[in-house]
Amino acid sequence: MAGHEHDHSHDDHEYEHDQEEDAQELEREARRLLALSRIRQYGDTVLRMKAREVESFDDDLERLVERMTRLMHEANGVGLAATQVGVLRRLFVFVDDGQDRVLINPTITKSSSETDVDDEGCLSLRDVLVPVERANAVTIEGLDVKGEPVKLELGLPSSRVVQHELDHLDGVLIIDRTDDESRRAALARLRPQPVLGAR
């Protein structure tokens, strides 16, 4: 019988472990939703505005970059543009090969002629995935948070991420870059649904 008791405590331990994992999962999800609530959502006019060049490289800029990087991770994103947090400045943060990067006043100086169509989502268009055609490889230049020049030669998936984020700085969204059918389906999901019984 002793063996049976041992099994019993083992089950309890596993149950506690599962509960712990569930709690962590819930906490992550709560953090994600909180982060998303701080990110401007489709319909917000700022997402359609063109961002301005960054001119001062100061503590405020560093704090903005830190806040955006944290938000991006908490929202489970791989990129976040300043316009998505309501700041009309030309900068975005993204994850490249597991490393956090920031690009300020970015410009694509070279794009490959090979393109690829793949589904893209966006933290500002929740629950929407649409096919978007992008260049497979790009060379992008800009500045880092200290104002030092940065030049990155990126292949997929990072090349897609930077093209997506650069679009944000010009007020362009993935629904502008997809086919008509996908756009219609996306807009139907994004429109607030009428409440049943409301007159």
Image (cartoon, grey):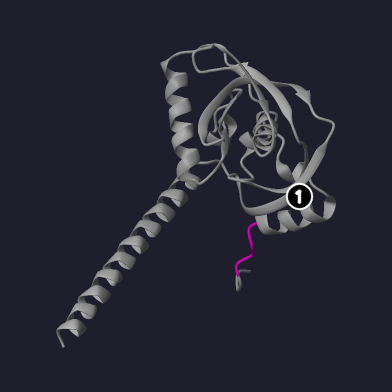
**Which residue does the image show at 44% across and 36% down from the upper left?**
70
Residue 69 spot, x, y in % from top left: 47, 33
Give the magenta part as a residue range: 191-195
- The picture quadrant where one finds residue 45 is top right
- The picture quadrant where one finds residue 154 is top right
**Which residue does the image show at 48% across and 26% down from the upper left?**
65
Q: Secondary structure at mark 1?
A: strand
Of the 4 image quadrants, the one containing the N terminus is bottom left
The residue that label 1 is drawn on is 131
From the viewer's perspective, tell me whether residue 186 is left or right of residue 66. Answer: right
Residue 119 spot, x, y in % from top left: 71, 50
Of the 4 image quadrants, the one containing the C terminus is bottom right
Residue 141 spot, x, y in % from top left: 66, 18
**Which residue does the image show at 40% across and 58% down from the upper left?**
25
From the viewer's perspective, tell me whether residue 156 is left or right of residue 62. Answer: right
Q: Nearer the viewer, residue 177 or 49?
A: 177
Query: Does residue 100 lie above or below 9 as drawn?
Result: above
From the viewer's perspective, tell me whether residue 191 is left or right of residue 148. Answer: right
Mark 1 neighbour density, 10 Å: few (under 14) some (14–19) many (20 or more): some
- Is residue 182 a member of the stretch shown in magenta? no
Q: Nearer the viewer, residue 13 or 67?
A: 13
- The picture quadrant where one finds residue 30 is bottom left
